[in-house]
Image: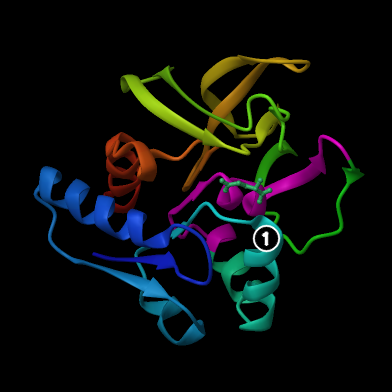
Amino acid sequence: MRIGVLGLQGDYEEHIYLLKKAMGKKGVSGEVIPVKDRSVLRRLSGIVIPGGESTVIGRLIERSGMTEELREMISQGLPTLGTCAGAILMAKRVRDRVVGEVTQPLLSVMSIGVVRNAFGRQRESFETEVDVEGVGRIRAVFIRAPAIVEIWGNARSLSSIEAPDLGRISILAVEGNMIASAFHPEISGETALHEMFIDIIKK
Ligand code: GLN
């Protein structure tokens, strides 16, 4: 398999490292490549959209002319894992905890609604253990993370936590070929979500 990691901005190097580790663990052969332009898109078996700054990544996706093609490929079944900013870019509904309505460019492919920067100033960054359905307990790093506050259609939540103001919110959702995570498995070094992603590719 050939997995691409969108390499325009954000922590894509960490994803490349962890994907290779997850492939090794699962005994899967293949390569992991950074995706910087359209040229490789059609040859991918799956794509990861990393954490970073969703406004910046969204603009860079547009500038590189990938928006339509990526949206179409993901909608037609390309396995996709988005973490943090990546999950924001995948969501069909996005608002910001402070400013509300956002106008940033999005891929809008997944039936989830997210609130950007949902955890407020005191808890901008934190690390905790979370329970993930089908996986068990893993360490999760949250950095100015979004909360998944709406899930509809075929999407469903695999993990949730208590958030200040918002109550119980989802932090991990799946829908067919797509996984959206509010936290960063690539930073805590957890391969569980990458393994789940590889399983989707293998199907
Ligand atoms: N707050 C960032 C955003 O809205 C996401 C942060 C992250 O990816 N760590 O894009």
Residue at (30% x, 60% y) in the render:
16
Q: Is mark 1 within 8 Å of ligand 1?
A: no
User: On the rendered structure, is 83 left or right of 56?
Assistant: left
| Total numbered labels | 1
Residue at (38% x, 39% y) in the render:
185
Q: Quadrant of the N terminus?
A: bottom left
Q: Is residue 140 above or below residue 102?
A: above
The percent coordinates of residue 91 (x first, y second) are 68, 46
User: On the rendered structure, is 187 left or right of 63?
Assistant: left
| Colouring scheme applied when the structure was drawn | rainbow
Front-lying residue, 109 or 63: 63
Front-lying residue, 124 or 177: 124
Residue at (64% x, 74% y) in the render:
60
Q: Is residue 173 above or below residue 168?
A: below
User: On the rendered structure, is 127 left or right of 28?
Assistant: right
Q: Residues within 10 Å of mark 1 (few under 14, many from 20)?
A: many
Question: Does the segment drawn in magenta span residue 99?
Answer: no
Which picture quadrant has residue 129?
top left
Callout 1: SS: loop
Which picture quadrant has residue 64?
bottom right
Q: Is residue 17 above or below residue 42?
A: above
Residue at (27% x, 39% y) in the render:
191
Q: Is residue 153 above or below residue 177?
A: above
The percent coordinates of residue 186 (x first, y second) are 36, 45
Outermost residue, front side: 122
Q: Which residues are magenta?
A: 74-98
Question: Does the segment drawn in magenta span residue 93?
Answer: yes
> Could you tell me the amino acid type at mark 1?
Leu
The percent coordinates of residue 189 (x first, y second) are 29, 39
The percent coordinates of residue 36 (x first, y second) are 47, 79
Outermost residue, bottom side: 39
* Residue where numbered disc 1 is placed: 107
